[in-house]
Image (tube, rainbow, N blue to C red):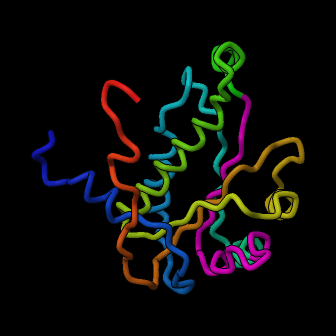
Amino acid sequence: MADQEFDFLELVRSRQSDRSFDREKKVETQQIERIIEAACLAPSACNAQPWHFVVVTDADLTNKLGKATASFGMNKFAKDAPVHILVVEESANVTSFIGTKLKDKYFPLIDIGIAASHIVLAAENEGLGSCILGWFDEPEIKRIVDIPASKRLLLDVVIGYTTKEKRKKVRKKKDKVVSYNKY
């Protein structure tokens, strides 16, 4: 399978957090559907799928969401993103919940991180830019799109056609972050 034309590592290398979007260039419904399918196929502990994705494409709403993500100089670019995928935490199933208690690891947050990764990689595969946002006015966004007050809104993934060139990735050297057989 590694010799097929598609190169997953090249996709990962090209994906970046984009912070400049062409508001006028429409993201097609079929592109969004493929991205959401990838998110729904993400693995989760005990197949709990502890997420709900709110896809926002209405220009008036995306503008309001953009304003709700911008504060203290952060995320001003979000108002120009034509698509916001809001990731809401849902209840885990019983086995995931038991695993969380027994292993002292909150699996729903791990699962949602994996789903967000699927979203941004699928967006890159569609030729779209993306950025995962965790800094936003949660109560305001929940009000704008009618997310129940009892739910946690964990992420806003903004998607659109980027207006900037790809940047060179800067990463720690592998020997600083990877070891084999021992720490």
Does the magenta segment cover residue 63?
no
Residue 78 appears left or right of 39: right
| Residue 151 x %, y % | 82, 43
Q: Does 74 appear above or below 107?
A: below
Asked whether 30 or 142 is in front, the reply is 142
Q: Does 162 appear above or below 183?
A: below
Tell me the magenta residue range: 67-91
Task: Specify the quadrant that holds the C terminus.
Answer: top left
| Residue 48 x %, y % | 61, 26
**Residue in the picture at 65% in, 26% down:** 105
Q: Does 53 appear above or below 105?
A: below
**Residue in the picture at 46% in, 54% down:** 35
Total labels: the figure holds: 0
**Residue in the picture at 67% in, 74% down:** 75
The extreme left residue here reads 3
| Residue 113 x %, y % | 57, 44
| Residue 79 x %, y % | 68, 79
Task: Specify the quadrant that holds the N terminus.
Answer: top left
Residue 135 appears left or right of 35: right
**Residue in the picture at 43% in, 69% down:** 128
Does the magenta segment cover residue 72?
yes
Residue 38 appears left or right of 76: left
